[in-house]
Image (cartoon, rainbow, N blue to C red):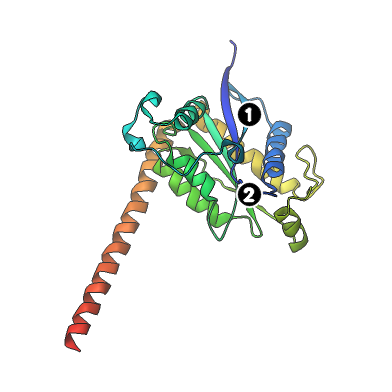
Amino acid sequence: MAKGIARIAVVVCSNRKPRANPQIANFVLETIESTFQDRWDLTPELKVIDLGEKNLPFFDEPGVPSQIHDYTKYAHEHTRAWSQEVQSYDAFIFVTPQYNWGYPAVLKNAIDYLYNEWKGKAAMIVSYGGHGGGRAGVQLRQVLCGVHMVPTKKPVELAFPNRKILLEAATGKDLGLDGFSDKGVWSGATRKQIAETFAEMMDILCSNKLKKGLKSAAVTFGFAKEEIRRKFKKSSVDHSNGTEESKRE
């Protein structure tokens, strides 16, 4: 029996210039190609999406994305095109830098344009930075759960080994990355981590873990909302106490 195809987008999540994001995304892609084990019912077909080339304006749709179930109902052509592109993929690998403990605005903007198109899609997060970009990865995972994607439990965090390489990355210099061997900035354990996380995403795509993942995403999002409620409640109480103190004075 012929295997089905899993269309997977490797997303370049930065639009600054110069930038290291494209070569790091390529390293991730090469690592997956060189470590892939053909043990699933689906054959992955990977393609790069560079948000820096999409040139999506800041979100300008008059409608609420969660209420739109037909891409023809979007007001703008750039949204309709983006909707169709996202719909054409089964899973997404987000390769993102960390900026001030968060991920780039261009990525948040691209996500916020849509809602139902993301729902149920598997996702893998690869963050990078001076310490691996873990905080950006955590924030991104919360947002992906918010649009009901199914992110892997294992994150991939690529840390620059020293300041020299960090500065070279920031200025877009060639980092000599090689996803086909254990030579270069990241090797051995790092390539293994990418391979294991990609395998987890393939498991999500190929089994009923998708349904379990959707439930998990909903629960995770529920926890996030509950945390916001607690903080808001505490803030309201603090404000109220402050007002009472002012009255006493």
**Residue 151 position within the rendered picture, expressed as x and y whole percent measured from the top left:** 49, 40
Q: What x and y, as percent, mark residue 182? A: 80, 44
List x then y, in percent, for residue 203.
Answer: 54, 31
Separation of disc 1 and disc 2 at Cα? 23 Å
Q: Which of marks 1 and 2 is nearer the N terminus?
A: 2
| Number of disc labels | 2
Q: Is residue 139 visible?
A: yes
Q: Which mark is drawn over residue 29?
A: none
In the rendered image, the vertical position of residue 164 relative to residue 193, given as above or below: below
Image quarter for residue 61? Answer: top left
Residue at x-position 80% and y-position 40% = 181
Between circles 1 and 2, the one closer to the viewer is: 2
Residue sitting farthest toward the top: 1
Residue identified by numbered label 2: 16
Q: Residue lying furthest bottom in this view?
A: 249
Q: Is residue 75 depicted above or below 231 in this figure?
A: above
Is 18 displayed left or right of 9 in the figure?
right
Residue 115: image location, x then y, percent: 40, 36
Dividing the image into 4 quarters, which one contains the N terminus?
Answer: top right
- Of residues 209 and 133, the one nearer the viewer is 133
Q: Quadrant of residue 67?
A: top left
Up the image or down, 18 lies above or below 9; here it is below
20 left or right of 116 in image: right
What kind of residue is marked 2? Answer: Arg
Q: Which amino acid does label 1 sit on?
A: Leu
For the residue carrying disc 1, how many other residues have a C-alpha within 10 Å: few (<14), some (14-19), or many (20+)?
some
Where is mark 1, residue-wise? 46
Question: Residue at image x 73%, y 50%?
Answer: 172
Task: Give me the residue at 60% from left, 41% from top.
Answer: 52
Q: In this view, does 141 lie to the left or right of 170?
A: left
